[in-house]
Image: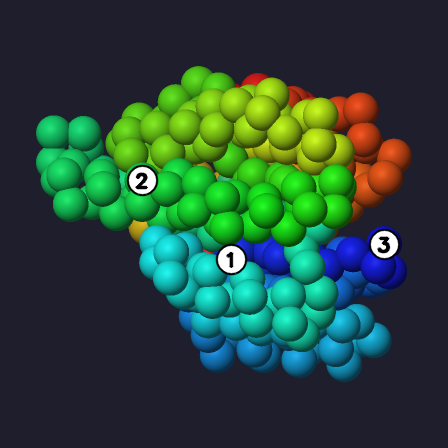
């Protein structure tokens, strides 16, 4: 993967950071884009200290101008992007009748529209070289729904639809587009949900056939395969990484 440049949104934390770390270890030059600019820079510095090539950039995925300028900076410093992983995301929980349009719009803006904007910003580089890999980190919650998470689950279901369409539109250009809906993965986002009582850890683990909570590295390993040369015949797919659960 040494000649490849990868962009990972939400790359300063949790699943995005684990994916960035794994792709850097596999030899890719990695741009970590995150709303938290300082955390993105610190994470990139850590990857460099581990022997990787990385760049940390503060980017809000709801801001198209910021995305375009970051993609241009990546092109100038690391080379044109061949891999895009959309992991930036937020979650909000609460009863549906109390969900405001403002909260709904914010969750959709980050999780779904942010993914759309990043795909549109990066695809021209992939089309030009006739090779590309996009992996959208959706959520296992889109299989069954989760009470109190209408905006989040809807945004994640939308990411699956977007993945399917892009796979069809760009398959003949050497570009694959897949989605990983993670199950219950221990990250700062999940720890916050546990703290707020949205989920119960023991209950979640008891419902998981492999009997443990997921690790960010479980997602990173699957992502590393999907962005590899060998995964060229896999596109438009939903690759569940959930310890055997389907909800
Ligand atoms: N942890 C889980 O169990 C789980 C399960 C299913 C899906 N997911 C999805 O995986 C992805 C990563 O989640 P995580 O658990 O690693 O969470 P996390 O909170 O640890 O990481 C998410 C990152 O996204 C960044 N971010 C938020 N809004 C942003 C914006 N507007 N622009 C750019 N960056 C932004 C945050 O700063 C953070 O660094 C999310 O899309 C989440 O919905 C997580």
| C-alpha separation, residue under disc 1 versus residue under disc 3 | 21 Å
- State which mark lies toward you, 2 or 3: 3
- Secondary structure beneath dot 2 equals helix
Above or below: residue 36 compared with residue 65: below
- Secondary structure beneath dot 1 equals loop
* Left or right, residue 110 beside residue 166: left
Q: Which of 79/7 is in front?
A: 79
Tags 2 and 1 in contact by the CB under 8 Å rule?
Answer: no
Tags 2 and 3 in contact by the CB under 8 Å rule?
Answer: no
The x, y position of residue 121, in whole percent, is: 50, 50
The x, y position of residue 149, in whole percent, is: 31, 33
State the residue lying farthest toward the front. 128
Identify residue for label 1. 10
In primary-sequence order, the first of circles 2 and 3 is 3
Q: Is residue 168 visible?
A: yes
Identify residue for label 3. 1
In primary-sequence order, the first of circles 2 and 1 is 1
Residue beneath the point at 12% across and 29% down: 97
Mark 2, other Cα within 10 Å: few <14 / some 14–19 / many ≥20:
many
Residue 112, quarter of picture: top left
Above or below: residue 96 compared with residue 190: above
Task: Name the quadrant of the N terminus.
Answer: bottom right
- Secondary structure beneath dot 3 equals loop
| C-alpha separation, residue under disc 2 versus residue under disc 1 | 15 Å
Determine whether the beta carbon of the residue marked 1 sits less than 8 angstroms from the nearest atom of ligand 1. Answer: yes
The circle on residue 124 is none
Mark 1, other Cα within 10 Å: few <14 / some 14–19 / many ≥20:
many
Identify residue for label 2. 108
- State which mark lies toward you, 1 or 3: 3
The x, y position of residue 49, in whole percent, is: 76, 81
In primary-sequence order, the first of circles 1 and 3 is 3
């Amino acid at each position: 993967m040494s000649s490849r440049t990868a962009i990972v949104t939400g790359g300063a934390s949790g699943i995005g950071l684990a994916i960035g770390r794994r792709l850097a270890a596999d030899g890719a030059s990695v741009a970590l884009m995150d709303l938290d600019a300082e955390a993105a820079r610190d994470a990139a510095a850590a990857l460099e200290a581990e022997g990787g090539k990385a760049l940390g950039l503060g980017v809000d995925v709801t801001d198209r101008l910021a995305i375009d300028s970051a993609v241009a900076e990546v092109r100038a410093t690391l080379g044109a992007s061949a891999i895009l992983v959309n992991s930036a995301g937020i979650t909000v929980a609460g009863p549906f009748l109390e969900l405001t349009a403002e909260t709904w719009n914010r969750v959709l803006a980050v999780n779904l529209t942010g993914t759309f904007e990043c795909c549109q910003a990066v695809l021209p580089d992939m089309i030009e070289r006739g090779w590309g890999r996009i992996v959208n980190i959706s959520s296992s919650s889109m299989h069954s729904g989760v009470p109190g998470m209408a905006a989040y689950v809807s945004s994640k279901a939308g990411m699956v639809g977007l993945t399917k369409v892009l796979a069809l539109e760009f398959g003949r250009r050497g570009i694959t587009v897949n989605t990983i809906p993670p199950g219950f993965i221990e990250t700062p986002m999940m720890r916050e949900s546990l703290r707020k009582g949205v989920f119960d850890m023991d209950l979640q683990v008891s419902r998981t056939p492999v009997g443990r909570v997921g690790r960010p590295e479980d997602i990173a390993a699957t992502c590393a395969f999907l962005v590899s040369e060998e995964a060229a015949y896999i596109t438009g797919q939903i690759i569940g990484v959930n310890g055997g659960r389907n909800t």
